[in-house]
Image (spheres, rainbow, N blue to C red):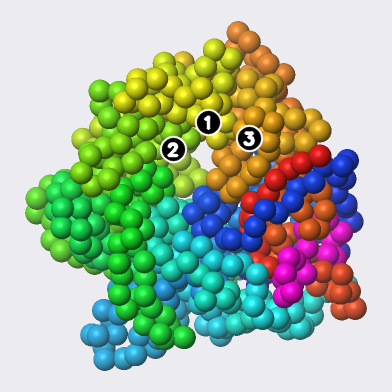
Amino acid sequence: MLWGKAKRAKGAAAASALLACSVAVTGCSDGVHVKVKDYNFDTAGNMFAYAEFELSGEPLAESLGLDLDVLDAGKIDSPTAFDYAAGIESYEYSEEAMYEVVEKSGLGLHLANGPAIAAEARKSGKPANEVLASRFVKMAESVGQPADQIQQNMFPTFIEYASGDPQYPQKVDTSKYADGDNGSYIPKYQVDFSSLRWDRGKMKKQLIPAAYGGTMLKQALWAGDFLGNLHNAESDEEVDASTAAEGPEADQGLKLGVSSVDGMQGMILTEEVWNKLLFMRDHLFYYPASKTLGALPAIGTGAYLPHAVDVTENGDGDYPNAQSMTVSDGKSMLQDQWLTLWPASEFYGMTDQRKANPNRNPAFGRVFDGDPFPAAPAVNTDADPSNDVKSDDPYTAARQVLLAVFDNVKTHHWNDKLGAFVTEYDGAKQGTAVDTFQAGYTIEALRMFERAIDGLPVGYANGEAAEGLGTKEGKQAKDMIVKQADFILKSLIGKDGLAVAGYDAAKGEASQETTLLAQLGAIRGLTSAFLATENEAYRDAARKLYAAMDDKLWDDKLKAYKTNGDSASYDPFTVGGVSAVLRLALENLKNTGSEPDSPKSLDQSAIQDRYVTFFRQVVNGPALDEGMQASEFWDTGDVYKEGDDSGNTDGDTVPQVQKGHGENGIAPVLLPVDITN
C-alpha cells in the first residue's frame, strides 16, 4: 500500500510523482561541520519537533499562497526552495517519523493490549490480537480501504517509551516489492515493517508524559487532518462534509476520511490515541501523599501524571504489555504537563460532541457517532457535568484527562502572586524556578486548551475566528495567558532586547543568561498571547524579540543561530522551536507596512530565506553523515532504483534509511548535533 497525500496527487499519480527521478543537489560545508553528538532517540523532543515541522510544512506553504498540487518530491526546489523545504521536506520528515515510532519501531506497548481492545477481548472471549485485527478491518471498511492493503507486520503502540536506539539491529529489506517508473521500485520494507524494528533491549522502558504526550500531539494533528473531511467512495476525491445529507455516508456514495489511504491512517492514529487516554486515565495518575499510582480520581484531589514511570514488561515478544509499573520520579514537571495538555486539547476538539458547540466539524461527528468509534452518553455532552456517567468512549476519556491536566497546571504550577508558571512541583510544594521556554510553550498549550474547551477550531484551523462557548475553564486559561505574557514583558526581557533564560522566584531576580531557547519560548508565548487576546502589544514585543534574535544570534558562517554564547548545539526541542518561530514570523509577525518600524529581518522574503538556509544546514546538514535528519524515506524524493546502490538517488545530503549511520542504517529521525567551523 502506498501512503497517499490527500492534498496532493493520489493513487497512481502520487506513486508516479513520488517515484520520479530527482534533480541532484549537494551540500556546501564552507568548512562548517554539523556533527552528530550521539544516537539516542529522545521521543519527547523528536515528536515535539516533528509536530512543529508539520505545522511549518504544507499548512504554512499553503497559507502563503502555494497550490499544493504543484509540489513534487522529484523536483527539488520547485516551485521555490522555500516551497520544497516546507511542503516536501519538513512535512514529510514529520509524517514518516511519526509512523516510525507508532507503527514500525516497537517503541512502546502493543496496541493489542490497549484498554479498549482488551475490554472487547474479554467481552468476546477472543484473543486480543484477533480483536485488534477485526478493528482494523472495520476501520478499513469505513474509509473504503481494501483490508488486504494494510501494511504487514505493523507494530502499533498505545503508549510510547522515553527513548531508544534508532540504528536498525537487522538488515532493512530493500528488495523490490513492485515496479515504479523509470527503473524505480517500491521496496519491501514499505509494505512489510518487520525489518524496521528497533532493538528492544536498548529501549528506555519508561513512561514520561512529555514522550507519550509528544507522540499524542503528532497523532492528534495528523488524525485531525486525515479525518477532517469525507471522500467519494468511487473516485477517492475529497468531499466537503458539510454538503453531505444526514444519514449513513455509505448510502450517499461517501466514505470517512479525506481519502481512503489517509483515512485509514487517521483511523489507526485515533485508535491509538483513544487507548492511550484510557490507559492514562485508569493507570498513570499519581497520588503524592501515598506515593501510589492508579486511576484518575475526582478532579481537584491532587493526583497528576508523574514525571517517570518504569515499566517491567510481561515477556511477550510479539505483543509486549506491562507486567508492573513503578514510579521512579514522582515530580510534576511543567514540560510534561504542557506537552500533554496541548495534544489532549487537539484530540478533544476532534471528539467534541457537546450539543451547545456550533463549530463542530461534521466529518468528526460521523467518526464518533458509534461507528467506527463509540459515541459519548448524552448526559456527558450536556452543560451539566454533575450528571456525567462513567464511560470509556473517546470523548469522555479525552475530557477527563484534559481537565485533570489543566487542573494540575493551574493548581501546582501556576504562581498567581508572580503571574508565572514554575517548572516543578515535588508533590508537596511548588518550586521557584521559571523557565522562559517552558513558560512560553505553556501559553501555547493553554491557548489550544481554551479553544478546545470553548468549542473553537483546533488543528490546522487553530487560527480561525469563531464564537466560543465562554466556559469557566476557558476564562481561567485566558487569564493565566495574559498574566504570563505580561510577566515575560516585565521580567524576562533584558536591556539588550533579548529574553533571559528564566527567573528565580525565591530570589526575586531574573537570570543573566540569554539562550536561543529563551528567545524561542518568549516569541512563541507572546505570539500565542496575541492570537488568544488580539492585544497588539504582544505582537509588537514578539516582533522586537525576533529582530533582536536574528541580529544578535544568527551566525552567517555557521548558517545557524548560536544557542548559548558562541556555541551552536542543537537538540530536537531547539530545532522544533526554531521551526515554530520562523512559521510564526511568516504568519503573524512579518512586516505588513502598517507598523512604525519594519526591520528587514521581518520582510517575508528574508524570513523565507532564513527558513531554507537554516533547514538545509541544521536539519539536512552539509554532508551525508552530518545534520540532524538521520535518514529519509522515499516520500522526499530519495527513490529506489534498480542497479543503484548509492543510498542517495536524489543526490542530496540525507541518505536512505539503509545507508544512514550504523551498520544496517538508521530510522528517519532527528539526532542532536554540534555546529563548528
In the drawing, does residue 610 fall left or right of residue 548? Answer: right
Quadrant the N terminus occupies: bottom right
Q: Nearer the viewer, residue 627 or 251?
A: 627
Dominant secondary-structure state across the stretch colored magenta: loop
Q: CA distance from mark 2 to mark 3?
A: 16 Å
Q: Is residue 560 visible?
A: yes
Q: Nearer the viewer, mark 2 or mark 3?
A: 3
Label placed on residue 124: none
Amino acid beneath label 3: Thr
**What is the secondary structure assignment of the residue under circle 3?**
loop
Callout 2 crowding tier (Cα within 10 Å): few <14, some 14–19, many ≥20: many
Residue 130 shown in magenta: no
Above or below, 363 against 34 in this view is: below
**What is the secondary structure assignment of the residue under circle 1?**
helix
Q: Nearer the viewer, residue 363 or 516?
A: 516
Residue at image point 26% right, 91% down:
125
